[in-house]
Amino acid sequence: MNHAQLTALGRALRLLGEHGESLTADTPDAKLHEVKADLRRALDLLEDSVSTAPTTTRCAEHPTGPVDESAPDRCLLCETRRRAARRSEFGGGRPQPVEAVASAPSRYGVRGDRPQPQQRWLPELWNGREWQLCGTPRRDRREAELYLAAQRRGSRPAMAYRLVHEFTDYEVLRVWGNPVQVDIEPMGNL
């Protein structure tokens, strides 16, 4: 809706409001016909200013998408995605291809049985009692250090931060600040 349409529609609606305030039980028919014409004019202005189709769902991603009445947001596309996720949770997804079985099982297992080592950097903060994760684990160390630097410069920094290197096992790489044990009970729980 452009500015001219917005101005004209606002003027027409204000005029209708004035008509509504002046209506009484003995309003003459000529005045009612004038109200009817002004109401049609406002509806025409509104029809001209609306450029998109009316929404059929309550979904922000697919407002004019197909409708599923049983979905909470009435969106068939999102509900299909949610149903697929629920099916995969319970193992009802697509059948997995059957792999060839070795003739004799290995004492130490095969490569596919062992988990792949993952290297991640975990940003943590000291909350007064323990270290807690304060952001998403990062695959890049520099990105994790930049994230912690931004946290320290933020409006409400924690007492201490640390960066933990996770590579199948954990190793503390760097600590910023001094963690101090804080008793949560007032006066030492006396």
Image (cartoon, grey):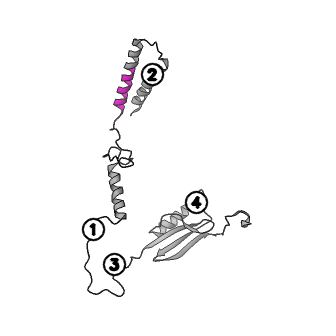
> Residue at 34% of width from left, 30% of height from top?
47
> Residue at 44% of width from left, 25% of height from top?
13
Query: Position of 158 compared to 142: left or right?
Result: right
Q: Nearer the viewer, mark 1 or mark 2?
A: 1
Q: Which residue is mark 1?
A: 95
Q: Earlier in the sequence, mark 3 or mark 4?
A: 3
Residue 57, given in percent of the width and then of the height, sits at 36, 44
Q: Quadrant of residue 104?
A: bottom left
Hey, what amino acid is under mark 3? Gly
Q: Nearer the viewer, mark 3 or mark 1?
A: 1
Q: Is residue 91 above or below residue 60?
A: below
Q: Earlier in the sequence, mark 4 or mark 1?
A: 1
Q: Is residue 36 above or below residue 151?
A: above
> Residue at 37% of width from left, 23% of height from top?
41
**Where does the C terminus fall, quadrant-wise?**
bottom right
Residues rendered magenta in the picture: 38-59
Q: Nearer the viewer, mark 3 or mark 4?
A: 3
